[in-house]
Image (spheres, grey):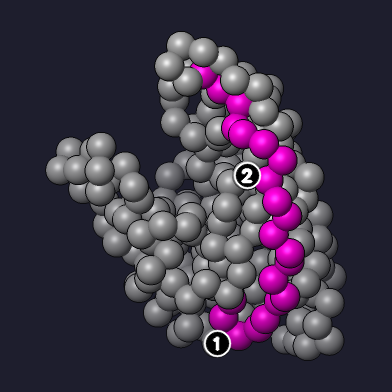
């Protein structure tokens, strides 16, 4: 029987696919329907409530609470235009209440100030065509920090009316000049959705595959 993982705030399943490749059976929970979710089971519901009620049934829980409350756009360009809930503290409290090992994932920046950053992953570490730094807090277990390789060049895209070549694509937003959907899919390692917003909100499966393999390499990883 495969070890069980809960992907909270699962979205389309970027982290889910990686954990599947690592050997987990993955259930995802999200407050919105996710018709293109790639996991083994999908639960529509509030992630925090579900973690509190059912998190103890899983060997590992991965949570990527929405970062809009603390992101750069909310603080700068979009300041005062939108209101987003701050879910970080409540998510951590729910995870800790289960007594199970967990992963919290968020982008670097303002949101990271509310996390204990145990390691940071970058697309360059996995030979991806995207940089996409992500911070991870590990609760109840540990993994080594991989070496952060030097970036090979600039991000490809349109700048002030001129197209620049580079080994990476910027996978965010809806604006033009950031590469095609196919470029984004190849860069991220995501092929089961062609919706830009879904790709942009995901993490590359290579990140969670590496995390899952590190977790399962521990002798006590799948203790009941």
* As drawn, 145 above or below 127: below
Taking the image as shown, residue 23 lies to the left or right of residue 89, namely: right
| Residue beneath disc 2 | 131
Task: Measure how far apart labels 2 and 1 are at the Cα level.
Answer: 33 Å
Q: Position of residue 117 (x, y in %)?
A: 52, 72
- Residue with the most extreme top position: 161
> Does residue 53 belong to the magenta stretch?
no
Compare residues 222 and 154 and report the one nearer the observer.
Answer: 154
Is any part of residue 34 visible from this angle?
no
Vertical placement of residue 37 versus 53, above or below: above
- Callout 2–callout 1 Cβ contact below 8 Å: no
Question: In the figure, is residue 165 to the left or right of 136?
Answer: right
Question: x and y percent of residue 50 in the render?
Answer: 46, 67
Q: Which residue is mark 1?
A: 99
- Reading the chain from its start, which is encountered first: label 2 or label 1? 1
Q: Residue 111, can we see it?
A: yes
Residue drawn at (65%, 53%) of the image: 122
Classify mark 1: helix, strand or loop.
loop
In the picture, the quarter occupied by the C terminus is: bottom right
Is residue 111 placed above or below 93 in the rendered structure?
Answer: above
Where on the picture, by quarter, is residue 93? bottom left
Residue 145 relative to residue 83: left or right: right
The residue lying at 61 percent from left, 80 percent from top is 101
Q: Which residues are magenta?
A: 138-158
Q: Position of residue 220 (x, y in %)?
A: 78, 88
Quadrant of the image containing the N terminus: bottom right
Is 115 situated left or right of 71 in this image? right
Dot 1: few (<14), some (14–19), or many (≥20) neighbours within 10 Å? Answer: few
Q: In the depicted view, which residue is nearer to us: 208 or 145?
A: 145
Q: Position of residue 121 (x, y in %)?
A: 64, 59
Residue drawn at (25%, 43%) of the image: 76
Q: Most prominent secondary structure in the magenta stretch?
A: loop
């Amino acid at each position: 029987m495969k070890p069980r993982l809960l992907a909270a705030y699962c979205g389309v399943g970027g982290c889910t696919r990686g954990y599947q490749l690592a050997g987990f059976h993955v259930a995802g929970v999200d407050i919105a329907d996710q018709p293109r979710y790639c996991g083994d089971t999908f639960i529509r519901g509030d992630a925090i409530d579900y973690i509190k009620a059912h998190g103890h049934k899983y060997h590992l829980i991965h949570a990527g609470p929405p970062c809009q409350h603390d992101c750069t756009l909310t603080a700068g360009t979009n300041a005062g235009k939108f209101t987003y809930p701050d879910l970080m503290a409540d998510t951590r409290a729910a995870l800790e209440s289960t007594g199970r090992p967990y992963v919290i994932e968020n982008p670097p920046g303002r949101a990271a100030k509310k996390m204990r950053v145990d390691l940071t992953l970058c697309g360059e570490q996995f030979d991806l065509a995207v940089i996409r730094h992500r911070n991870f807090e590990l609760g109840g277990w540990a993994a080594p920090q991989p070496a952060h390789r030097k970036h090979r060049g600039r991000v490809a895209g349109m700048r002030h009316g001129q197209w620049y070549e580079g080994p990476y694509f910027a996978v965010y937003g809806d604006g033009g000049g950031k590469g095609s959907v196919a470029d984004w899919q190849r860069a991220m390692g995501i092929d089961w959705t062609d919706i830009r917003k879904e790709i942009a909100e995901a993490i590359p499966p290579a990140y969670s595959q590496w995390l899952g393999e590190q977790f399962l390499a521990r002798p006590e990883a799948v203790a009941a």
